Image (cartoon, rainbow, N blue to C red):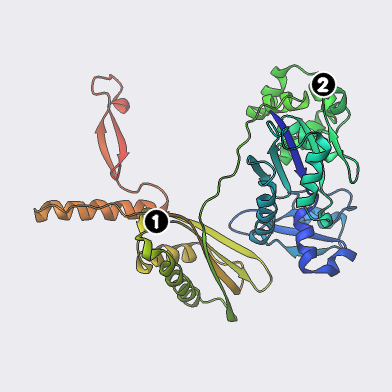
Amino acid sequence: MKILCVLLPHFPLRCEMLRHPELSNRQAAIVRPKDTAGSQKILLDYSPGLDGIQRDMPLQQALSRHGNIDLVQADVPYYWTVFNELLDGLENISPLVEAMELGCAYLSVDGLQLIYPNNKALVNAVRNVIPASYNVQIGIAEGKFPACLAALNSPPGGYQILTDDIGTFLKDMSSDVLPVSLKNRGKLHNFGLHTLGQVAVLPIGPLQAQFGLEGKQIWELARGCDDTPLHPRFMKETIEESTSLLSVTTSVEAIIASMEYLLSRAFVRIAVRGMGIRSLTIWTCSWSAEHWEHNIRFKEPAMDTAAAISRIKHSLESFPQPGPVEQLGIKVTLLGCCSGKQKNLFPEIRATDHLMEDIKQLDLRLGSPQVYKVKEIEPWSRIPERRYALVPLSR
């Protein structure tokens, strides 16, 4: 498959410069929490020219090399909002567009020859969609990884096309370009494998022995072979509501009250269609611009505010905020219809049904099965442990 890669270097930093132009004259790093606990920060992006640091590096390690850089808290939802607007424009060129990550997109260009007679016309169409301030780089090749490397090494204001001799093009490139974990990239350097050419001449066996499942991927990519299929994004309906608080707060009750207000506004928009919420994302932004978000899925669609607010309350209580909250919002990502159920005539059976429903909600709330039953599996087995098994009662 012929792929065109659109690469926007330092895209999160460019987004921040749109909001804060003063960052263009300073050295800055955009940081985000490594996990939901938020105790450790890692780099999401940084200013060009800062040697010795790279993406996903721990903040402490980056500060040890450049202690005078300005730190900016990542606003990932804002970056994706800007990026999705650019992807909407790219879909006017090709219907098959994949958003690999922030600042990197792939387009399938097979079959576009009738619209764009040559590669130059296709590249010009892409450049007309992307504002010049993003310094877009474009590469075309067979496969996503070679196309990405072609874009990464394209001349300023131009583009690069890889044809048959991909091995020669890749052999002198650093092994840091491989899309594997930071740990494994460091491991490659420890073994003296600093370039893709050094990796490509090795047999596949030792790489698999040292790197496990990623060993085969490393070996194939170093040879320029990437048959990963394109996963085009699909349009889905989302409903978003947000608000800014009059004053920052750390009160969970105040946050829940605001969430309940936003939910009521969302239900006004979907209630007329007789649908409920099946998937929901809640987010908050602290006064220091630290972002927090959590995804909630409902086994049965929440048809009103009361049914959804209990799950939101549990999420807010279970996952503390990174700081005093200044802004908050919700995003409904999936809607659903409530399935009709006829209740049993016999009260003892209805009581059992109610109990099973409570168990399902408990499993969903805690994220794993909590109540089990003993089920006969292999009663003929001579090993006692194989005769029975514990299975979730709610399944």
Q: What element carries label 2?
A: loop
Q: Residue 326: where, in percent of width, then height?
A: 61, 75
Q: Earlier in the sequence, mark 1 or mark 2?
A: 2
The three-letter amino acid code for the residue at tag 2 is Asp
Q: Nearer the viewer, residue 10 or 361?
A: 10
User: Which numbered dot is residue 97?
Assistant: none
Q: Name the residue under label 2.
A: 164
The reply to whether residue 341 is visible in this rendering is: yes
Camera-side residue of 35 and 243: 243
Q: Where is residue 50 in the image (x, y as percent from the top left)?
A: 88, 53
What x and y, as percent, mark residue 107?
Answer: 69, 39
Q: What residue type is labelled 1?
A: Arg
Quadrant occupied by the N terminus: top right
Separation of marks 1 and 2 at Cα, in angstroms: 54 Å
Picture quadrant of residue 204: top right
Q: Note whether residue 176 is visible.
A: no
Q: Quadrant of the C terminus?
A: top left
Left-right relation of 249 to 50: left
Which image quadrant for residue 226?
Answer: top right
59, above or below 224, in the image: below
Above-or-below relation of 193 to 158: above
**Left or right relative to 98: residue 376:** left
Dot 1 corresponds to which residue?
365
Badge 1 marks a residue whose secondary structure is helix
Residue 348 in the image: state x and y as whole percent: 11, 53
* Left or right of residue 127, residue 341 in this image: left
Q: In this view, does 261 lie above or below 170?
A: below
Front-lying residue, 244 or 361: 244
